[in-house]
Amino acid sequence: LRKLEKSSKTKTPLRIKWGADPSAPDIHLGHTVVLRKLRQFQDLGHIVIFIIGDFTARIGDPSGKDTTRPKLSVEEIKKNSTTYKEQVFKILDKQKTEVVYNSAWLENMKFDGLMQLFSFQSVSQTLQRNEFKKRMENGKDIRMLEFIYPLIQGYDSVVLKADVEIGATEQKFNLLMGRTLQKKYGQEPQVVITMPILEGLDGKQKMSKSLGNYVGVSEMPENIYGKIMSIPDELILRYFKLLTFLKSEDIKDIEISLKKENPKQIKEKLACTIVQDLYNKKHAEEAKTTFDAKHTPGKSLDDRIKHIKPEVKKISPSQLKEGKIWICSLLTTIKATASNSDARRLVEQGAVYIDNEKITDHKSEIALSKSKNTLITVGKRKYYETTLTE
């Protein structure tokens, strides 16, 4: 509160820090819980500093992990950094965001600087963090690099002179380290704000790509809508609180409605709101139409397809032999199936259509042409349109 008052009096915007290690290619809805809070600060006139942890990603944050993170290559980190930079602006205001890479100050840090930094924390203090306690109890390794991670992340706050840092509750140890180090370096310590961890689509574990219970912010609107419609009813209110910009009084109205109305209708509103925030109103309406068409019982294949926008998939001509591709290979290439054996099973079950014609022979060769896209239907809910790349 004191920092806000000072900012208001001096008309100086606060510097709000948020960092993310690009350990995966995509940001999911779990990340947007923090992003939405950052956007609220931006709407009040403050500056968000988004740190892409391209250096700290090489170490691996132990927060919330009972095992050491797998090591990433510099190439993987660089590739992931590009997508992070694009995806955060689905929520953040680009004009009020500074994007920095912590390799800029960490990569060439001299050894005497590192010795000074490491002298500010003891081994016994570091072992107090829950993740390390659990590992020791279970006889699991703790790497030296993981020991120094909080100090390295905390040093980012010193370099950037952050006023506020926001992160998930599991990041609390690292965030408080930023405060400690700022005091050691003679700076006013940052205010730490922790945000709740979002449960995944299963409603049991935290949202995580590795667990498969996530919604990527760059997924197709139809996929996002469909995934939100799949969440347990118990998650509806929590998702409204953490994944929308609705006011508290509107959330209270939804809470009351959930006790009286069919949860499906309220879940539809949630799905539309999230898609609209990430894309726009038109995409949200189209996503709803697609979902309804897929899930309305008793409709023929033609009736369902009529209202559905298929997912476009590109096929390289190099994958064709004399202009044709094996049906199982085609389904696996467009990721309609996980393997050729899965594809074969679906074909033999009569669940695969090419341009509305059922394919029953798993040995079929499908002709693809640059002059005409091919419509592929798998089951009742997967629709694709293939196009040949140049």
Image: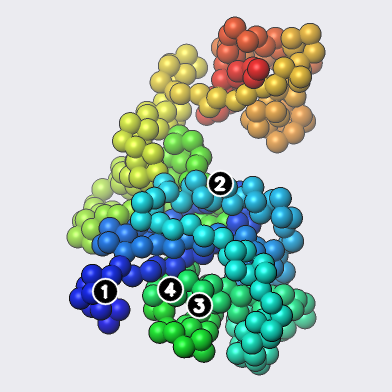
**Which residue is identified by label 2?**
83
CA gap, disc 4 and disc 3 = 7 Å
Residue visible at 33% across and 31% down in the picture: 282
Q: Give the mark nearest the N terminus, 4 or 1.
A: 1
Of circles 4 and 2, the one toward us is 4
Disc 3 residue crowd, few under 14, some 14–19, many 20+, Cα 10 Å: many
| Residue type, numbered disc 4 | Ala
Q: In this view of the protein, which residue sits in the foreground, 203 or 316?
A: 316
Check the image and tell me how it is coloured.
Answer: rainbow
Residue visible at 61% across and 50% down in the picture: 80
CA gap, disc 1 and disc 2 = 33 Å
Q: Which mark is residue 98?
A: none
| Residue type, numbered disc 1 | Ser
Q: Give the mark nearest the N terminus, 4 or 2.
A: 2
**Which residue is identified by label 1?**
7
Of circles 2 and 3, the one toward us is 3
Q: Which mark is residue 162?
A: 4
Q: Give the mark nearest the N terminus, 1 or 2.
A: 1
Q: Give the mark nearest the N terminus, 3 or 1.
A: 1
Badge 2 marks a residue whose secondary structure is helix
Q: In this view of the protein, which residue sits in the foreground, 181 or 323?
A: 181
**Which residue is identified by label 3?**
158
